[in-house]
Amino acid sequence: MRSHDISRWAFLLGDERDAWKKGFDDAAWREVAVPHDWSIEQGFTPEASSGTGYLPGGIGWYRAHVPLSEAGPLEGRHLRLVFHGAYKNADVWVNGYHLGGRPSGHAAFSFDVTEIVGYRPDDDLVVSVRIDHTDISDARWYNGSGLTRRVELEVHEAVRLTSLAFETLSVEGATARVRIAASLASAVDADVEVTHALRSLSRGSVTALAAGAAIAADGSAETVAEGAVPGADLWSDDAPHLYELTTTLTWDAGGEPARSEHRTVVGLRTFVFDPDRGFSINGSPRTLKGVCLHEDAGAWGVAVPPVVWLRRLLSLKRAGCNAIRMAHNPHAPELYALCDALGFFVIDEAFDEWENPKNKWWQGHNVYPPRHEGAAHDFPEWHERDLVAMIEAHRHHPSVIAWSIGNEVDYPNDPYASPLFAEMTGNNDASKPAAERQYDPSRPDIRRLTTIATRLAAIVRRADPTRPVTFAAAFPELSRQTGLLEPLDLVGYNYKEHLYEADHAHLPHKPFVGSENGHTYRAWRAVIDNEWISGQFLWTGIDYLGEARGWPVHGSPAGILTIAGFEKPTWHLRRSWWSDEPVLHLATRPWAEGERTLWNPPITRAWEYNEGADVEVLVFTNAPSVRVTAGGADVPIEWDDDHGLWRGRVAASAGPLEAVALRDGAELRDELHRRGPAARLDAVPWQAPAPAVAACSAAGIDLGGALQIEVELLDAHGRRAAQDLPISVSVRGGELIGLDSGDLGDPSSYADSTRRSHEGRLVAFVRPERGATVNVALTAPGLPQTDLVCAPAPALE
């Protein structure tokens, strides 16, 4: 099988009734690179929905001209046009033939274009796609608009592989036993030999398995091969060994041998969710230290190059994170490949709503009236195809450990109702009008959800019986009574840690996981104090666009990384709980009497307080004790068991704030100094560590296509300046995609070439021209210009 990325497209933002025609003149349209997100290119506007980040949607057209001569020989081949996702309501034409469409913006879909290519009048294959994203309050988070994922033209031989399912049956000692199920289709009568070669990407060792099938013309067949892999390199979060699986089909084609090859990256591992002992991988107990992620990345929207995700994922990994929940939809295929290569466990999630829509807040967060557009419109007709598409696209990934059939569809009165409404605890809708906070029997009955969950769970088990079915429950105290949790193999609780103990007694045969959790130390203690809780997933790992509380704020600050990918103080706190590496980190904020949360007043690294001002000192460390001094004088601190940190109170001084700790005999030190105004701009292209590059390269992940330049304002002493300035960036040899400071309150367009720094930093994203040297010039008022000359990482062939 040969695959050809269709990456260059002509694009029009607007509707054009004749753009489906092969002969339509698109010469005046703008050329774009796909994956592409047109919403992120527009300016933020308060007229758009707060839920989806104050960015507009609309209707857009894409047209690609594919030279068929570059696709190689086509006679007797099967051609397939593959979309890995298009947001949303995509309609597709090829050479003027209408092939159909897909409402979902997250499901992969494809079309057989073999016959149409046979009618071609010339070498120019024209693919036309209309995207309709006019209902821009269709979700509670940003989903982008356009051909947001890769598009490929696949050229298959007459006998082809249509699907592959790989399973590790068992691991005994150094030997793994595997099962490979292959589905085949053929345009000719053929006796097909199927050979599977498993090559370790760590050591190069190869294991071969074989099967065979006889297929009639225009027919199909299933083959199964089982066997042992000696000296198996097992996949886990701390040792993510991978294998390249090469499946070769051979048959006789009119007296001549014919063959077709298909390559997939897989991993060997076994795992268990145990009701009493929690999660284990390859027989080794493991706590899931997870985060939930949406799929936007600031200036890139949702059309995110793998290297941009790599920078973010490596930061999460350094914090001790080992798991990701794909909230609340299937993500781009490159992200799963990165999770395989880096060692992240994945819960894959299909839906945020089922047959009835949830409230969508479009004038701010939880501000009435809501809007109700969304994926529920298409759920009755498309749910099975979308759910199976997710599983078939991702079941070969060793990182995927569970399939989630839904997120928080069990809100009472949103939209389903129950007479048990008054018994619910922790209802986060207390600000709703009174009529929304009482039982309304005219609403859909919440017991209907159990019927839907049972149906969805059965679909999952038919498509992949090797992984558990889970669900993220918002109100498990209600869902346990209605039977909604019964069809599940793994019960996910969102924020309801106080129910764990009692519900473990009610459901002793069910494993539990915190599918969505707050950042509190109490929520983390609920995991480590109860062996049978498999782990937690923070809401969220990274700030994201949408679910905004009101203009000009256009995103959620829930992450431990900013939307620009910078580490927040809470990243260091989380690292002190999650990481095995030594951690010591100082933070401060103005002293405030009374209750103080981790977010109010905000925590910073500042020490520029007026001398004598009352300052709260916070110390994040996994050392057993710590000493803090200010200007050489000891600062009294004490352990705060409610928040999992050391804290104290000090009068600010001109001298440095210093912390010293011992862990396993090694001294840890951190210090804060008074910072001055900006004296210069420092700019450094981000470089992935060599082991990560090697792992990605071995797994076939292309890390080219994007430069990430981290920019910092420095004072005269080389410390980050206590000042923010507008920073301008110009690029030769590439395209400036956008600037991002991480400030969700700055509604400047990402397309602008100037953006104000936030806490002295921003990141510049550049798409290099193929083969070009990239020259970047950075300026800020009153500072000397900084110039960079850099080249992109080489793309994989």
Image (spheres, rainbow, N blue to C red):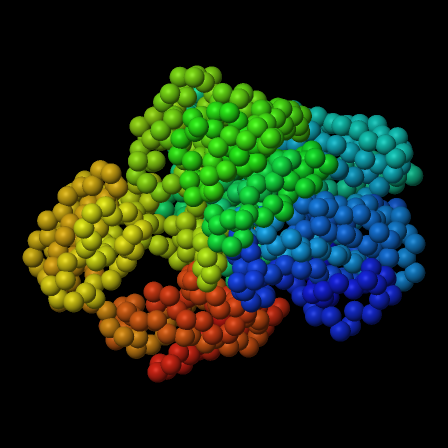
Say if residue 407 shows up in the picture. Answer: no
Residue 322's place in the image compared with 274, above or below, is below
Q: Residue at 80% across / 47% down in the picture? A: 100
Give whichever of 134, 189 is nearer the camera.
134
Q: Residue at 32% across / 40% down in the picture? A: 520
Q: Is residue 659 left or right of residue 739?
A: left
Residue 338 in percent (x, y) is at 53, 47
Residue 531 in percent (x, y) is at 36, 25
Residue 319's place in the image compared with 478, above or below, is below
Q: Residue at 43% across / 17% down in the picture? A: 506
Give whichever of 699, 57 is nearer the camera.
57
* Quarter where residue 56 is shown: bottom right
Residue 271 in percent (x, y) is at 49, 27
Assign the C terminus to one quadrant of the image: bottom right
Q: Residue at 41% across / 46% down in the picture? A: 317
Residue 793 in percent (x, y) is at 53, 62
Residue at the far left in the pictured view: 633
Give whichever of 198, 288 is nearer the camera.
288
Give whichever of 361, 91 is nearer the camera.
361
